[in-house]
Amino acid sequence: MKKFSFKSFMLGVLVTVLIAESALPGLAAATMKTAELYYNSIKVKLNGKILDLRDAKGNPVEPFVMNGTTYLPVRAIAEALGLPVSWDAETQTVVLG
């Protein structure tokens, strides 16, 4: 049976910490991205009427363009269409209707 070596133990701990530390930035990179967003006073018109887009707290929200695609605030659009909106935090899902 091998004799316990404090030096070997500490080396093992150090290697484990270094491996874990190097893996964390890789995990973050998989879920976080940097993007350029273009705000250009985009308006949304529904049935001939310009919508006043607001978030759940009543703050104004503005559509934006990213990589050639226009993104609209889903809550404001759904509510303008008369759809109830909720958020399922467990599944990270916006529920309309």
Image (cartoon, helix red, strand yellow):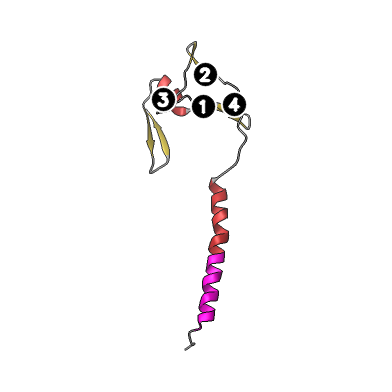
Tell me where residue 52 appears, x and y as whole percent.
Answer: 47, 18
Using the image, tell me which numbered label, if any, was put on residue 58: 3
Question: Are discs 1 and 3 less than 8 Å apart at CB?
Answer: no
For label 4, count other residues whose C-alpha is less than 10 Å away and answer few (under 14), some (14-19) or many (20+). Answer: few
Q: Is residue 14 magenta?
A: yes
Mark before the other along the chain sequence, 1 or 3: 3
Quote the CA–CA distance across marks 4 and 3.
20 Å
For label 3, count other residues whose C-alpha is less than 10 Å away and answer few (under 14), some (14-19) or many (20+). Answer: few
Query: Which amino acid, mark 2?
Result: Val
Front disc: 2 or 4: 4
Residue drawn at x 58%, y 43% as measured from the top left: 33
Mark before the other along the chain sequence, 2 or 3: 2
Quote the CA–CA distance across marks 1 and 3.
16 Å
Mark before the other along the chain sequence, 4 or 3: 4
Query: Which amino acid, mark 3?
Result: Gly
Residue wearing tag 2: 44
- Is 96 drawn above or below residue 6 in the view shown? above
Quote the CA–CA distance across marks 1 and 2.
9 Å
Residue wearing tag 4: 39
Which residue extends farthest top? 48
Tell me where residue 37 appears, x and y as whole percent.
Answer: 60, 32
Which quadrant of the view contains residue 43? top right
Question: Are discs 2 and 3 less than 8 Å apart at CB?
Answer: no
Residue interval drawn in magenta: 5-18
Question: Are discs 1 and 2 less than 8 Å apart at CB?
Answer: yes
Query: Which amino acid, mark 1?
Result: Leu
- Is 18 drawn above or below residue 51 in the view shown? below
Judged from the image, the secondary structure of the residue bearing numbered disc 4 is: loop
Residue wearing tag 1: 72
